[in-house]
Image: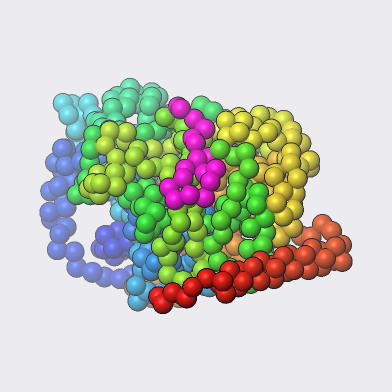
Amino acid sequence: MKKNLILPAFTLGALLGVGACSDLEVENRNTPDKTRALAAPDDVETLIASSYVQVFAIGHYYNNASFSHVHMANRHTATWGNMGLNDLGREPREPLPNTPSYRWSYVFEANWGDAYRGISGASDGITSINNGVMIGEGGERNGRAKAFGKGVQGILHCLVGLWYDKGYVIDESIDLSTAELETVDYNGMVAAGIERIDQSIQMSRSEPFDLDPAWVGPNTPWSSSDWADYLTAWKARCRANAPRSDAEANSADWGSIMADASSGNFAVNLCCPRWDDTGPWWDGLKTYAVEENTWHRMHMDWLGMADTSGQYLDWLSFPTEQRTPRLMSFGADQRFPAENIDFAQGVTAWTDVSRSNTTHRFRTTTPFRPERGTYRQSHYADKRHEGRYFNPADWGSSGGEYGIDHMSLDERDLYIAEGRFRTGDYGGAAAIVNMYRTAAGLPPAPANATDAVPGTSGAGGDCIPKKRYDVQGRCGNLRDALIFEHFENVFHIFGGLEFWHGRRFDILPQNTAIHLPIPASDLEVLEQDVYTFGGGGEGSAPNPIPGAAIDPLTLSLQRVAISLERLQERHRELQAIKNSPMVVR
């Protein structure tokens, strides 16, 4: 759809998160103040610098789509209404409630609004420089400001493409008073983002500068080369996560993704002093992600890939609404607790602080409301961020002196491993996957696409991982091992990574919405039709459950055996109750 975009309407839209176009006339009483502000060099520089806060907000704040979508990927689990967790994590999946009246409408609105606020700020600042504003003596800081603003534009266009089905390409080259704009699809948004990132990289490589340490995180003293290396990593992140299906991912430009992942800087920790929730550099995502008494547990579908007790296989045999949390065992994988004792915890596979240091903990209690689905309850929590980012004794702290992981070497390595796998270099993919498996105590995965990982399959089988959602408990192959190591090593680094990974591997639960629509509040202001995705309609994920590989008779016999075992277990429970004194509760 194409319409004339009148400047006051877009100014209002940028402030409210309205990223579409309309002939909506709104008197802007702030225009004189804005004109004066954009003529002051220091204010222009501050406007461009502050645009990066929107990148941070999308990746690290909790009051946006990040929490709901890590649940929609069946990695994190919770039943609370906040952040849309209960509604969007419910199974069977329902259409996204894209309405202005939805209580948690910020799930749809926050990332959209943050992206276009940042794009608008960077674009206005660059326009002022192009119109003659001189930052520093003789404009000595103009190049730095323009390179930084262009990079932020690129990242934010990319993020719109990763989160939403479509968006608008906006920058300083567009005269919003006369422009006719139309939406472009997610691929077009990502391409526009990479184009602007490349422009920033070229500017940063050709004109050296040092960033102010407060521009990227609370204290990140980067050079222009550091900024360019960071943007190169973003190119890999953008291209790898754009596909909406396994088929699209197979067609992605993995040569460029692997090259950018190899040459970019993924060891990005926004460091380092204590900060609190009154400032912009607070990682609410990581803080709440490890708060196991209220906000977080690992989803049973994550745990089930490593289960060697047969409990997950039995859990799958029940209808969804009848599933309850199980006590499991995890074989040789030392990242999981060896015993189901309260607070028992696995052992991290790494001593390197630049790695994820994954470890999981068992809890006897489950904090979530049972009437909202016992299938979402779990006894296990991921603990990698505890202590590094979050101090349970001080909620105003994000963990003291470590800083905030924003990208990681694990993310980089697993993009390269995925690229090798998808381009047929199975030996190269296995080399990276097995680095993680060996560190975790697991035997190497095969260096081909067909053989199963070592171990036995079925109920009580000791192979890790099993195929995801597989009711037969079959041992996974190299692809499954690659998927599982992403689960284990990329969790709450930057909001959306888990969901985008599940989307491109076709392992999201059936009928999960594969992307967000333009927020309804914006569509209604622009007098456009409200639409949505998921729940079996347009934009729904396919059925991820692996097909049966054995004959129906054998499968029926297995089900009979499981049912008989369950009846015998129930008989033993009733006998124990009969022999125990009655307790009034």
Rendered position, 74 above or below 480: below
- Front residue of 60 and 307: 307
- Front residue of 522 and 418: 418
Q: Is residue 421 left or right of residue 238?
A: right
Position in image of residue 115 (x %, y %): 36, 53
Q: Give the range drawn in magenta.
A: 335-352
Position in image of residue 540 (x %, y %): 59, 66
Position in image of residue 134 (x %, y %): 19, 33
Rendered position, 421 above or below 225: below
Number of marks in the image?
0
* Residue at x 36% of width, y 52% of height: 291
**Magenta span dominant secondary structure:** loop
Considering the image in quadrants, where does the C terminus appear? bottom left
- Front residue of 198 and 583: 583
Color style of the picture: rainbow
* Residue at x 22% of width, y 26% of height: 140
* Residue at x 72% of width, y 48% of height: 461
* Residue at x 26% of width, y 37% of height: 400
Q: In this view, does 347 lie to the left or right of 398?
A: right
Q: Can residue 566 be seen in the rendering of this structure? A: yes
Position in image of residue 550 (x %, y %): 84, 59
Rendered position, 450 above or below 548: above
Residue 387 belongs to magenta span: no
Q: Can residue 151 be seen in the rendering of this structure? A: no
